[in-house]
Each structure stands twice: as structure tokens, then as C-alpha cells.
């Protein structure tokens, strides 16, 4: 298997073989995830449904900003309708959903999403949620996914061109996992978009090499499309904000 300089495996995805499959969505799974979101984040203001869904039906649930949560929270459902193709030693990682957060002034109307500068985070959620099923692979904690090879910015107005999956920091810990039963537990991963040099550092030295910079620049799943790379000048005092690694 191909590995990065940090020793982590690199997966080269190939499209799945077989007939085109249309998915309708698992209503019980959707209800479980909806209840989980409302229990641990807040009331769902709306759901963006897919019209045509190959393999899995990906919905995006939207929780609006609140006084204690000054951002939109977007969470997928449908990725966990099917198990991912995880390594044999990681059966507990077969089911996952994704989330990210948008600033309170982000354009959220469908007609505004006709502009790719507004739509790309939603596209990213849907694309990554379908990716493991489309390519018969898996996504898990600390995985990075470039936007092409070589990676290209997601849209005009941003230099972000890849993403890493991390534990959510904008939610409580109870949101991170939904236990469905003895054979199914759904992990919720946060999508944190990255610059090209941040992805390169992760491949060379591992994900923990990013965390000091994330501390300094307050990088999280709360999207700032114009943020600078966290590998810039590291002269700010450490805030010890990132709780999942680093010194």
C-alpha cells in the first residue's frame, strides 16, 4: 500500500463497478439522526433533499444560528445508510455522517446557491458523504481529501482546496457518536477545509503537526473561506484551543 512520509496510508480511489443505483433513503435512519441533531445541537430549521440520489440519499439538515451558537450547523444524513468498506480491523468505523458550520451571514437560499461561491460547502458535504460508497472505500478520523490532483480551490474567492475530518469542536462531546445498536454506531466527523500547504504538512508529518497552527488561527469546522494558511507566522500567543492533539 502507498504511504505518506508520515507513514499513513494513501488511498487511490477507483470508481465502483456495477449498475447505476438510485437510493430513496432510510426513513428510520433519517429520524434517528434528526433526533440526535435536535437533542445535542438545536432545532432543525430545514432539510435540503436530493432529487436524484445515486447509491445513498444525502440530505442536509440545517440548524440556524442561536444566541449561544452564532453559526449555521449543517449535518448530513444518508451516508450511514450503507456501511463503508473499512479495513477488517476497524469494523466499528463502518458508519459515519459529516458536518460543518457556516457563518451567520452565509447565503442560505436555494437561488443564492446557484453561485458556486455560496454553494461549494454544501457540494463538499454531499460529495464527501457519497465518496466512500461511490469508490467502495471509507472515510475516517484524520483522513484528508484533496479537491483534485493537484488540488484546486473549491470556488472563486477561496484558496481552500482540500479537507480533513476531525472531531467536531462546535458541539458537545455527546454529539460525536450515535449508538443505534450492537452492530451499528454512527460517528459524526467535522469537515475542516484546508490550504494546499496544510495538506502537504499533514502528509509529511501527520495530522497532529497541524494543531498548533489551528490553535493560533482558530481553525475549526466553522468555515472562513478567506482565512490564511495556519502555517503562516506563528507569533501569536498559544490559546490551547484545539483539544485533540498538539503540545
Image: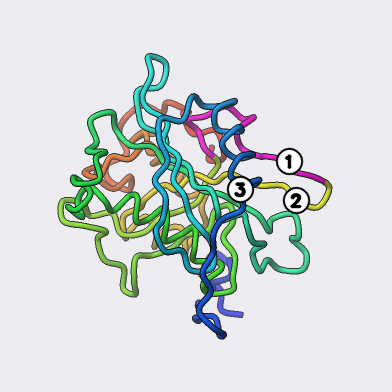
Q: Colour scheme in the image?
A: rainbow
- Where is residue 92 shown, x and y percent of the image? 74, 54
Q: Secondary structure at mark 2?
A: strand
Say which residue label 3 marks: 27
Q: Which residues are magenta?
A: 168-181
Q: Nearer the viewer, mark 3 or mark 1?
A: 3
Say which residue label 2 marks: 184
Mark 2 touches mark 3? (CB < 8 Å):
no
Q: CA distance from mark 1 to mark 2?
A: 7 Å
Q: Residues within 10 Å of mark 1 (few under 14, many from 20)?
A: few
- Where is residue 103 shown, x and y percent of the image? 29, 32
Q: Residues within 10 Å of mark 2 (few under 14, many from 20)?
A: some
Closer to the chain start, of discs 1 and 2, is 1
- Is 139 on the left-hand or right-hand side of 154? right
Closer to the chain start, of discs 3 and 1, is 3
- Where is residue 152 shown, x and y percent of the image? 26, 66
Mark 1 touches mark 2? (CB < 8 Å):
yes
Above or below 73: residue 51:
below
- Relative depth, front residue between 80 and 4: 80
- Relative depth, front residue between 85 and 168: 85
Above or below 69: residue 127:
below
Could you tell me which residue is drawn at 54 percent across and 83 percent down?
Answer: 19
- Is 2 covered by the magenta stretch? no
Could you tell me which residue is drawn at 41 percent across and 55 percent down?
Answer: 50
Say which residue label 1 marks: 179
Amino acid at each position: 500500500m502507498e504511504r505518506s512520509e508520515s507513514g499513513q496510508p494513501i488511498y487511490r480511489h477507483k470508481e465502483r463497478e456495477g449498475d447505476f443505483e438510485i437510493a430513496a433513503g432510510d426513513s428510520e435512519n433519517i429520524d434517528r439522526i434528526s433526533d440526535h441533531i435536535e437533542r445535542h445541537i438545536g432545532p432543525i430549521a430545514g432539510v435540503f433533499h436530493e432529487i436524484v440520489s445515486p447509491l445513498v440519499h444525502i440530505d442536509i439538515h440545517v440548524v440556524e444560528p442561536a444566541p449561544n451558537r452564532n453559526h449555521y450547523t449543517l449535518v448530513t444524513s444518508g451516508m450511514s445508510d450503507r456501511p463503508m468498506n473499512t479495513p477488517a480491523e476497524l469494523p466499528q468505523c463502518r458508519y459515519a455522517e459529516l458536518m460543518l458550520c457556516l457563518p451567520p451571514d452565509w447565503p442560505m437560499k436555494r437561488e443564492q446557491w446557484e453561485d458556486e461561491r455560496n454553494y461549494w460547502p454544501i457540494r463538499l458535504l454531499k460529495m464527501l458523504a457519497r465518496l466512500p460508497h461511490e469508490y467502495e472505500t471509507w472515510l475516517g478520523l484524520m483522513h484528508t481529501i484533496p479537491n483534485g490532483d493537484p488540488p484546486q480551490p473549491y470556488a472563486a474567492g477561496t484558496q481552500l482546496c482540500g479537507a480533513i475530518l476531525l472531531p467536531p469542536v462546535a458541539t458537545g462531546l455527546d454529539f460525536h457518536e450515535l449508538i443505534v445498536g450492537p452492530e451499528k454506531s454512527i460517528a459524526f466527523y467535522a469537515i475542516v477545509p484546508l490550504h494546499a500547504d496544510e495538506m502537504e504538512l499533514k502528509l509529511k508529518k501527520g495530522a497532529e503537526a497541524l494543531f498548533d497552527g489551528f490553535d493560533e488561527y482558530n481553525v475549526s469546522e466553522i468555515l472562513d473561506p478567506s482565512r490564511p494558511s495556519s502555517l503562516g507566522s506563528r507569533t501569536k500567543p498559544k490559546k490551547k484551543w484545539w483539544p485533540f492533539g498538539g503540545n
